[in-house]
Image (cartoon, rainbow, N blue to C red):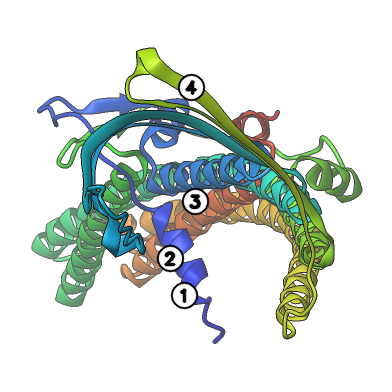
């Protein structure tokens, strides 16, 4: 068995969590699929984390832009000084004249503004372009997280629909088993059935009741899981407001779907942006060898007071260039190239993954549709067999072994049909996510006639 990387597991688990809000009420909430999706898009942890990552990338882009713009600083100071001339090397002695050793105290006011600007720094330019592409990649990843939330919510919602269908089918089996048990008891009392028939029908009834209890427990747990995904208040009960009908997919081919997926998938576009960011990072590393130009200007107003001050200024222009860096720049280039190669490989892998996902989704949809047809036919035959077996048992032609076996066949056929319907709709959800079409594509696929 191949285990998913820890980072991937952590990312997937984020979309199973949320930030709950509000207070639970005693009245169950009625949820449609769209209601659940809307709640998930507001509270799902995976989407909130992706938005935070996008904001972090935006901050990095703004920070890299600051390296291309001039910085301006201001300073105002009031200074009071008293100096010892001896400490600064002045030891004056004039015959007949008193020369003070201590000067001051005296004071002055200094107001200064200074600016510095790298008028040309090719490495900073490329770093900014790399940060800009990284921000775009993070923004696209956040949009892709939107589709992942839709997928997670729809999957959980469909699972609950399947659970409810199974509960209904099992309850029907419990009623059928109860009827068989009651009839066996009546026939035993009338002397037309053996005691083993009563025991056999009672065992069948208990088995169906156990199945019902287990399915009701699973139904409750799956509701809790969906509650976590969409951020309902803890303890808030809800009811499903709609069912998803079976509708064959006939709108387009896998080749058309692939073209749509490569154009629409936000994660694919995000990986492309990451490749462009890595390319700019390589150029930035190489540009560390290029000379840079800087200008600096300082203007001040200095005097005993602002009213008696005088302006001062300094202007400097300089060019800096690398003479020897002991291999630091070469190391930066090697690392940047390695990062670029990794991003290119990841993009190529995602392209292949998208191709697999699209084709696999179509295979799953086609297979599930065929399974639905077979399961419906099997259920019809199983119900006919059950009717005949009950008639034969009621007529005393046979014991209730045939009836019990027929009941099991009906239960199995019901479970197969529900599973096939769930698998078909789940494959449509996967196809909508694979195409990157979000909730609009999901509504289109699950409601297609």
| Disc 3: CA contacts within 10 A as few (<14), some (14-19) or many (>=20) | many
Q: Are marks 3 and 1 in contact (CB under 8 Å)?
A: no
Q: Secondary structure at mark 3?
A: helix
Which is more N-terminal, label 4 or label 1? 1
Say which of marks 2 and 3 sits in front.
2
Q: Which residue is mark 2?
A: 10
Q: Secondary structure at mark 1?
A: helix
Question: Which residue does the image show at 35% across and 44% down from the upper left?
Answer: 164
Q: Which residue is mark 3?
A: 418
Of the pair 134 and 207, the residue shown nearer to us: 134
Instruction: Give the distance between the C-alpha atoms of the residues marked 2 and 3, in whole angstroms.
Output: 31 Å
Say which of marks 3 and 1 sits in front.
1
- Residue 390: x, y in percent? 37, 56
Q: Which residue is mark 4?
A: 310
Seen in the picture, residue 236 relative to 423 is either above or below; the reply is above
Q: Are marks 4 and 2 in contact (CB under 8 Å)?
A: no
Which is more N-terminal, label 3 or label 4? 4
Which is more N-terminal, label 3 or label 2? 2
| Disc 2: CA contacts within 10 A as few (<14), some (14-19) or many (>=20) | few
Q: Are marks 1 and 2 in contact (CB under 8 Å)?
A: yes
Q: Which residue is mark 1?
A: 6
């Amino acid at each position: 068995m191949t285990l998913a990387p820890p980072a991937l597991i952590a990312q997937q688990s984020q979309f199973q969590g949320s930030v709950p809000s509000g207070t639970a009420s005693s009245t169950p909430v009625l949820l449609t699929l769209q209601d659940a999706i809307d709640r998930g898009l507001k509270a799902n942890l995976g989407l909130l984390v992706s938005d935070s990552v996008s904001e972090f990338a935006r901050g990095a882009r703004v920070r890299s832009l600051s390296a291309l713009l001039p910085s301006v600083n201001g300073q105002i100071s009031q200074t009071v000084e008293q100096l010892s001339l001896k400490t600064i090397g002045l030891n004056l002695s004039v015959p007949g004249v008193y020369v003070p050793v201590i000067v001051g105290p005296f004071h002055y006011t200094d107001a200064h503004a200074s600016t510095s600007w790298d008028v040309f720094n090719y490495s900073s330019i490329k770093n900014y372009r790399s940060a800009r592409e990284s921000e775009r990649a993070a923004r696209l990843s956040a949009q892709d997280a939107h589709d992942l939330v839709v997928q997670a919510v729809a999957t959980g919602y469909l699972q609950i629909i399947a659970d409810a269908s199974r509960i209904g089918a099992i309850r029907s089996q419990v009623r059928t088993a109860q009827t068989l048990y009651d009839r066996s008891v009546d026939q035993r009392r009338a002397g037309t059935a053996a005691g083993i028939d009563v025991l056999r029908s009672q065992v069948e009834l208990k088995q169906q009741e156990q199945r019902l209890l287990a399915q009701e427990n699973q139904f409750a747990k799956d509701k809790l899981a969906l509650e976590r995904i969409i951020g309902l208040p803890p303890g808030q009960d809800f009811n499903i407001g709609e069912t998803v009908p079976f509708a064959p997919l006939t709108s387009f081919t896998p080749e058309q779907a692939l073209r749509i997926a490569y154009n629409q998938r936000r994660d694919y576009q995000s990986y492309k942006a990451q490749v462009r960011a890595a390319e700019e990072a390589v150029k930035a590393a190489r540009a560390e060898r290029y000379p840079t130009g800087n200008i600096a200007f300082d203007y001040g107003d200095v005097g005993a007071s602002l009213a008696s001050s005088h302006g001062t200024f300094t202007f400097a222009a300089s060019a800096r260039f690398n003479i020897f860096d002991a291999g630091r720049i070469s190391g930066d280039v090697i690392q940047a190239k390695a990062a670029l190669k990794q991003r290119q490989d990841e993009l190529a892998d995602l392209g292949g993954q998208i191709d697999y996902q699209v084709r696999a989704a179509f295979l799953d949809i086609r297979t599930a549709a065929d399974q639905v047809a077979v399961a419906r036919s099997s259920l019809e035959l199983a119900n006919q067999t059950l009717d005949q077996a009950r008639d034969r048992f009621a007529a005393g032609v046979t014991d209730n072994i045939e009836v019990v076996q027929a009941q099991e066949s009906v239960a199995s056929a019901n479970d197969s049909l529900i599973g096939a319907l769930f698998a078909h709709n789940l494959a449509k959800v996967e196809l909508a996510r694979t195409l990157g079409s979000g909730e609009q594509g999901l509504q289109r696929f699950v409601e297609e006639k």
